Image (tube, rainbow, N blue to C red):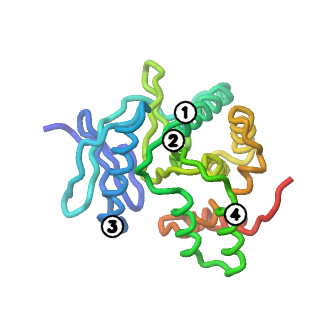
Amino acid sequence: MTEKKVLAERNTKIIYREGDKVIKTFNDQYTKAEVLNEALNASRVEESTNLNVPKILGVNTIDGKWSITSTYIEGKSLADLIKENPNKVDAYLDLLVDLQLKVQSCRVPLLTNLRDKFNRKIDECNLDPVVKYDLHTRIEGAPKHNKLCHGDFRPSNVIITSDGTPYILDWSHATQGNGSADAARTYLVLCLSHGEEFANKYLELFVNKSGIAKATIQRWLPVVAASQTVNKKARKEELEFLMRWVNVVDYE
């Protein structure tokens, strides 16, 4: 019998390896629809793009809990490599941005529309109606794109294999829409996980490589921050950080 090895354990899920497979088991905070949607998103990305992603092998219940089984990717996360090799941070950031732009060059037309998802989440926010109106206006005023957006693009979701091949994990938040919004999400994630200096270096690099004006990305920050406040799994310190961004109006 193949031995199980826990790879990650969080409040809402456990991820473990069993041979050449990875099994992600969810607790009852996740609905059946959420788990099935995560598997569906990943499958659509797998089938519609040439990106290196783990293959979905099955959706099951284990001891009454929903689970997703996928192929195991042997390697180290970009987050671990950054910790282990601080002198190579610039090279790793360069790779991170290149991968994100490669993702955004893809099209997966059956995914949820990013604008619809943001508008729905803004409606769910516990915010002043005037603030909500401003956020909806920002969304509707932004250019309408159909780029593949990962939704949680961060170093820990990129695995580098022994031969240097990068794989992108966790497509549960994938949508199609404006890539600037996805960059804004990554910026906020990096502020929390790697610090503001690291996040600012990422943003400058993304702007330079994409040719997108920094202000275009920054205008999405309050929208993205507000949409994340409805996440029931968010930690208290993360919610406090996000709320500081919600009321930001203008940037230089």
Q: Which residue is mark 1?
A: 102
Q: CA distance from mark 3 to mark 2?
A: 24 Å
Q: CA distance from mark 4 to mark 3?
A: 31 Å
Q: Which residue is mark 4?
A: 138
| Residue 61 in the figure: left or right of residue 250 | left
Q: Earlier in the sequence, mark 4 or mark 2?
A: 4
Asked if the residues shown at circle 4 and circle 3 are in contact, with their CB atoms under 8 angstroms apart, the answer is: no
Q: Which residue is mark 2?
A: 156
Q: CA distance from mark 1 to mark 4?
A: 26 Å
Q: Of the residues tagged 4 and 3, which is closer to the observer?
A: 4
Q: Quadrant of the N terminus?
A: top left
Asked if the residues shown at circle 4 and circle 2 are in contact, with their CB atoms under 8 angstroms apart, the answer is: no
Q: Of the residues tagged 1 and 4, which is closer to the observer?
A: 4
Q: Residues within 10 Å of mark 1 (few under 14, many from 20)?
A: few
Q: Describe the element under mark 4 as helix, strand or loop.
A: helix
Residue 31 numbered mark, or none:
3
> Residue, x 65% and y 62% (percent of image)?
139
Q: Earlier in the sequence, mark 1 or mark 4?
A: 1
Quarter where residue 235 is shown: bottom right
Mark 4: amino acid = Arg
Q: Earlier in the sequence, mark 4 or mark 3?
A: 3
